[in-house]
Amino acid sequence: MKCGFKKSIAQNALDDAPYIFPYLFDLSKIRLFWHGNALDLRTVEDPKLKMWSYCYFTVNREILGLVNFWTYFKQLSKTSFCCFRRVSEDSSLIRFSLFDTEQLHPVENLREAGLGMKQKDLLFFFNGTWSEISLSTRLELGIHRVDFPPAFEAVEELALSANKDGLYGEQPPGTYWSDHILIILRPRIAQVEMIGLDWFNKSGDDFGYVWPTRIARSKRDERFYGQGIRMANFVLDSSGQRLEK
């Protein structure tokens, strides 16, 4: 599944793709401001896992929020961003939360906030108001009309990879296919599209060890450019259905 592509086009597209924490999370590409002050992103390492466990969003040494493992993060503007994650391991719902940094407040009790995250199985926490919508991966493949909250008009298009239980129904004997799909949100036209990633699901790869994570459409050539865990970068045609080699 190796694909070659022009670095400039690919990099521009990937710079616009959501990041996943802590994998493929580039702190240098996130530039947010709070009432004119630049936010500082500070990571905390888990001594056992030897990798980042939290990322604090701070300003003037005060914490406005934090993200944990498996949080997807996309900056929308200098003062807005979106976080999303699967509600729980056994849930078909993906919850998207949109934040305005100007509406955030310093966290007064970090320990209490951390306990609240654990009790509610939250992957991120920001102290302020936000707009939210949940989408189900149980929707059929294809295009669906979905009415988004007004704040989501800030999002032109958002692409992500997710799992869809029962994607292929009962599989033929002796086969093992994965269940990844490409979800494309288009809030400005009240539209969500779901596409099966057959090129990956039926590749016979080491599923669970290898999987696609980040993806975004290039504004220059309309193709989708993506990255994954322990796999080569990939390119899809403008429909999002076919792998380009």
Image: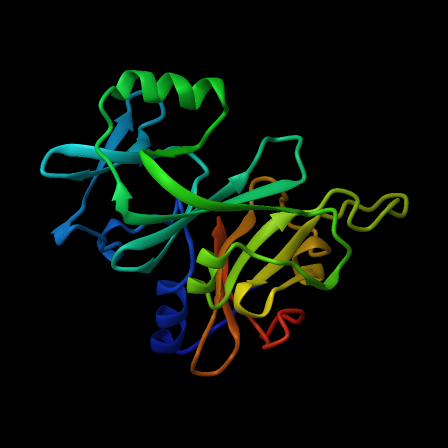
Above-or-below relation of 90 to 136: above
Q: Residue furthest bottom?
A: 221
What count of labels does the image hold? 0
- Residue occupying image coordinates x 15% and y 32%: 62
Place of residue 83 in the rendered image (x, y in percent of width and height, measured from the top left): 43, 46
Quadrant holding the N terminus = bottom right
Please give left or right for residue 92 compared with residue 226 in the image: right
Residue depicted at x 62% and y 70%:
240
Q: Quadrant of residue 91?
A: top right
Whether 52 is drawn above or below 231: the answer is: above
Q: Would you say residue 145 is visible in this rendering? A: yes
Near-viewer residue (140 or 241): 140
Relative to 111, 140 lies left or right: right
Vertical placement of residue 161 versus 89, above or below? below
User: Where's the C terminus, which quadrant?
Assistant: bottom right
Q: Position of residue 14 (x, y in %)?
A: 40, 64
Left or right of 216? Residue 244 is: right
Percent position (x, y) of residue 194? 68, 60
Q: Residue at x 26, y 57 (%)?
A: 29
- Residue 146 placement, left or right of 149: right
- Residue 5 figure quarter: bottom left
Decide if residue 22 is in sight here. no
Point 16% across, 50% down: residue:
35
Residue 128 pos. (x, y %)? 33, 37
